[in-house]
Image (cartoon, rainbow, N blue to C red):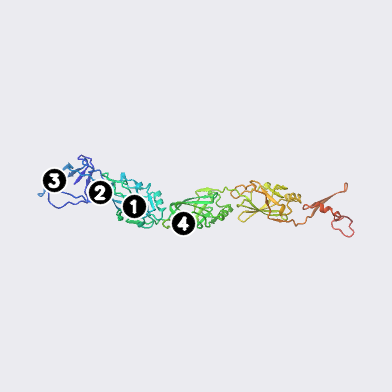
C-alpha cells in the first residue's frame, strides 16, 4: 500500500513499515497507522491536505476471499481530516555537557523550519522563579522534519551555561528545559504546547540522560601586559576563577627554557566564570621579570609553562598542562613596560672612594648612562656641580640599586668648591635629569627632585706630593698633590716645606726650610 502526493509519474511516495493490518475479512479495511509510521509520514510532503493525498494499490497488495488480486489503481482521498492536535514535549532525552548536545523528543513530527532556537531556555530548578536560567542564542540543530530535535550547543551557549555552575552542571535535577508555544509547529501548523508555567509533566522537562563535563579545559592563548602588570588567559571553555593558582605558572624565555621565573600568588576577582581570566601579578614578580634582561622583554622571549593546578573548569576538570621543552606556549599579545623609572633614594656619597649609590623605583640598565645629566648640589637651587663622566657601574637588589664611581676630574671639581659643597650630609644633594638613566625596558628616568644623601663618607685618604717645579729666576715654587689641598691651612706653616740637595738626605746634605 503506497500513499502518494499525486497520481502521476514522479510523485512523492510513502510506504508503511511499522503498521500491521487486522486479520479480519472485510470489504472496508480500516488501518490504524502506527505512531512511528505516522511520524515518518509527516516527515514527507504527502497527505498534508486533501489535494496531495492519494492511495496506490498493486496487484500483490490484497486478494479477495477467492484469491483474486486487487485491481491496481490510484485513487484520491475521499475524506481528509486535518491534524489539529498540538505537538508536545514527550521527553528531554539528553543533556550532554561533555559534547554540548541536548536532545528534545516531541509527541509527533515537527516542522523544523519553524523551530526558533532563541525560544529554548534551561533552568537550574523545577521552580519557575529560580534565578539560574539561560536562553540559547546561536546553537545549531537538525534541519529535517522529525519528532526528535538534536541541538548542538554553540561555544557561546555552552560556555554561558557553564558560567552558571548551578545550571546543568553536575546533576540532571539541576537542568530543566522551558519554551513557549512559539518554539515550533508541527507539519500541519499546530503550535507546540508550551513548557513555561508551573504545572507540567516533571518527567518531560528534566533530561533522562545527563552526561557531565569530563573534558579538561585547554589554554588557547594568553596576553601579557607589563604596563598594567596583568596577564590574560583565554580558554576553550568556561573556567572557574575560584580555582586559579598563579604559582603554577612559569614564565620562560624560549620553548626549552634557559631563563625562567615561577610566579607567586597574584591578585584577581573571585567568583568569575568565563572563558577568559585576567589576574594582576604580584609586585615582586614584576620586579623579578624586569630585573631579568633576558626574560619577558618581547614576544620573542616570552613563553609560559604550567601545571594542571593552574585552574579548573566549572565541573572541576583541571586544565591540560603545558610543559617546558614540550608544549610551552609563546605569548600572543605583548605590551612592554612603558612606566618610566624615578630616583627614589640618594643612599650614599662616598668621597673617600669617589662612589655614589642610588636607588630607583625599577630595575635599571647599567649601560647608556648620561653622567652629564647628574648634578651634585649643596641644597635645592644652591651651589651645584655637573658631572662630566663616571665608571664602574654596579647593580644590586634586583638592579634597583646602582653604584658608580666619579671620575678623578669630578672629584677634584667637587672638592675645589669646599666648603660650600659635599663636606657632610647637610650640603650633599643630587638631582638627575630626564633620560640620564634608563630601566631594563628602555624607559628614560624622570627628572628628579633634589635628594639629600642619606649617608656621607668623609675623605680620609691623605694627599701626597706628586712632583714640584722651582723657578730660581723668579723665585716660584709649584707643588702638585694627589688631592685638592686646603691652601689656607698649608700657608699657615710654610716652614714645613724643606728644600734639600738629595732625595735621600743625611746629616751633611745641604737643606733650607
Which residue is rendered at x = 20% and y = 44% of the image?
A: 81
**How packed is label 3: few (under 14 Cα within 10 Å), some, or many (20 or more)?**
some
Q: Residues within 10 Å of mark 1 (few under 14, many from 20)?
A: many
Report the label total: 4
Residue 70: image tag: 3
Q: Disc 4 and disc 3: Cα gap in Å? A: 76 Å
Asked if the residues shown at circle 3 and circle 1 are in contact, with their CB atoms under 8 angstroms apart, the answer is: no
Q: Picture quarter containing residue 165?
A: bottom left
N-terminal of the two: label 4 or label 3? 3
Which residue is farthest top? 8
Q: Which element type, helix, strand or loop, lies under badge 3? A: loop
Residue 102 percent across, percent down from the top left: 34, 52
Alpha-carbon span between mark 3 and mark 1: 51 Å
Q: Is residue 478 left or right of residue 434?
A: right
Q: Which of labels 4 and 3 is toward the front?
A: 4
Secondary structure state at the residue bearing disc 2: helix
Residue pointed to by mark 2:
39
N-terminal of the pair, mark 2 or mark 3, is 2
Q: Which residue is mark 1?
A: 177
- Where is the C terminus found, in terms of image quarters? bottom right
Question: Closer to the N terminus: mark 3 or mark 1?
Answer: 3
Q: Nearer the viewer, residue 6 or 122?
A: 122
Within-10-Å neighbours for mark 2: few <14, some 14–19, many 20+: some
Pair 2/3: label in front: 2
Q: Nearer the viewer, mark 2 or mark 4?
A: 4
Mark 2 → mark 4, Cα distance in angstroms: 48 Å
**Disc 1 secondary structure class:** strand
Amino acid at each position: 500500500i503506497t500513499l502518494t502526493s499525486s497520481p502521476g509519474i514522479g510523485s512523492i511516495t510513502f510506504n508503511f513499515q511499522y503498521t500491521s493490518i487486522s486479520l479480519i475479512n472485510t470489504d472496508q479495511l480500516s488501518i490504524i497507522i502506527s505512531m512511528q509510521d505516522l511520524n515518518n509520514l509527516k516527515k514527507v510532503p504527502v497527505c498534508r491536505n486533501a489535494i496531495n493525498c492519494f492511495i496506490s494499490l498493486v496487484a500483490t497488495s490484497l486478494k479477495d476471499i477467492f484469491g483474486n488480486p486487487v485491481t491496481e489503481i490510484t485513487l484520491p482521498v475521499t475524506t481528509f481530516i486535518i491534524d489539529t492536535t498540538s505537538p508536545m514535549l514527550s521527553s528531554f532525552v539528553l543533556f550532554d555537557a561533555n559534547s554540548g548536545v541536548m536532545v528534545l523528543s516531541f509527541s509527533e513530527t515537527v516542522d523544523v523550519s519553524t523551530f526558533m532556537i532563541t525560544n529554548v531556555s534551561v533552568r537550574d530548578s523545577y521552580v519557575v522563579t529560580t534565578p539560574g536560567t539561560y536562553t540559547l542564542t546561536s546553537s545549531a540543530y537538525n534541519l529535517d522534519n522529525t519528532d526528535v530535535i538534536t541541538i548542538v550547543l554553540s561555544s557561546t551557549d555552552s560556555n554561558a551555561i557553564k558560567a552558571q555552575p548551578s545550571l546543568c552542571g553536575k546533576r540532571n535535577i539541576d537542568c530543566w528545559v522551558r519554551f513557549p508555544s512559539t518554539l515550533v509547529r508541527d507539519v500541519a501548523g499546530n503550535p507546540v504546547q508550551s513548557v513555561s508555567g508551573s504545572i507540567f509533566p516533571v518527567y518531560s522537562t528534566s533530561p533522562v540522560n545527563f552526561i557531565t563535563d569530563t573534558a579538561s579545559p585547554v589554554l588557547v592563548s594568553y596576553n601579557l601586559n607589563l604596563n598594567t602588570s596583568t596577564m590574560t588567559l583565554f580558554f576553550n571553555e568556561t573556567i572557574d576563577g575560584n580555582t586559579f593558582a598563579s604559582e603554577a605558572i612559569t614564565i620562560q624565555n624560549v620553548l626549552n627554557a634557559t631563563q625562567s621565573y615561577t610566579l607567586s600568588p597574584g591578585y584577581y576577582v573571585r567568583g568569575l566564570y568565563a572563558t577568559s581570566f585576567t589576574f594582576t601579578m604580584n609586585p615582586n614578580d614584576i620586579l623579578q621579570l624586569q630585573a631579568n634582561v633576558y626574560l619577558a622583554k618581547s614576544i620573542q622571549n616570552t613563553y609560559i609553562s604550567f601545571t594542571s593546578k593552574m585552574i579548573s573548569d566549572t565541573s572541576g576538570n583541571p586544565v591540560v598542562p603545558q610543559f617546558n621543552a614540550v608544549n610551552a606556549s609563546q605569548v600572543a599579545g605583548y605590551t612592554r613596560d612603558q612606566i618610566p623609572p624615578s630616583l627614589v633614594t640618594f643612599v650614599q656619597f662616598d668621597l673617600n672612594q669617589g662612589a655614589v649609590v642610588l636607588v630607583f623605583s625599577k630595575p635599571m640598565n647599567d649601560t647608556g648612562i648620561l653622567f652629564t645629566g647628574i648634578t651634585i648640589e649643596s641644597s635645592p637651587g644652591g651651589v651645584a656641580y655637573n658631572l662630566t663622566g663616571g665608571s664602574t657601574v654596579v647593580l644590586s637588589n634586583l638592579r634597583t640599586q646602582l653604584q658608580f664611581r666619579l671620575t678623578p676630574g669630578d672629584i677634584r671639581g667637587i672638592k675645589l668648591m669646599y666648603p660650600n659643597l659635599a663636606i657632610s650630609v647637610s650640603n650633599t644633594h643630587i638631582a638627575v635629569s630626564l633620560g640620564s638613566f634608563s630601566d631594563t625596558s628602555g624607559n628614560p628616568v624622570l627628572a628628579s627632585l633634589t635628594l639629600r644623601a642619606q649617608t656621607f663618607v668623609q675623605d680620609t685618604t691623605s694627599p701626597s706630593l706628586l712632583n714640584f717645579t722651582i723657578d730660581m729666576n723668579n723665585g716660584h715654587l709649584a707643588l702638585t698633590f694627589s688631592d685638592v689641598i686646603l691652601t689656607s691651612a698649608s700657608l699657615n706653616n710654610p716652614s714645613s716645606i724643606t728644600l734639600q740637595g738629595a732625595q735621600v738626605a743625611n746629616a751633611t746634605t745641604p737643606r733650607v726650610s
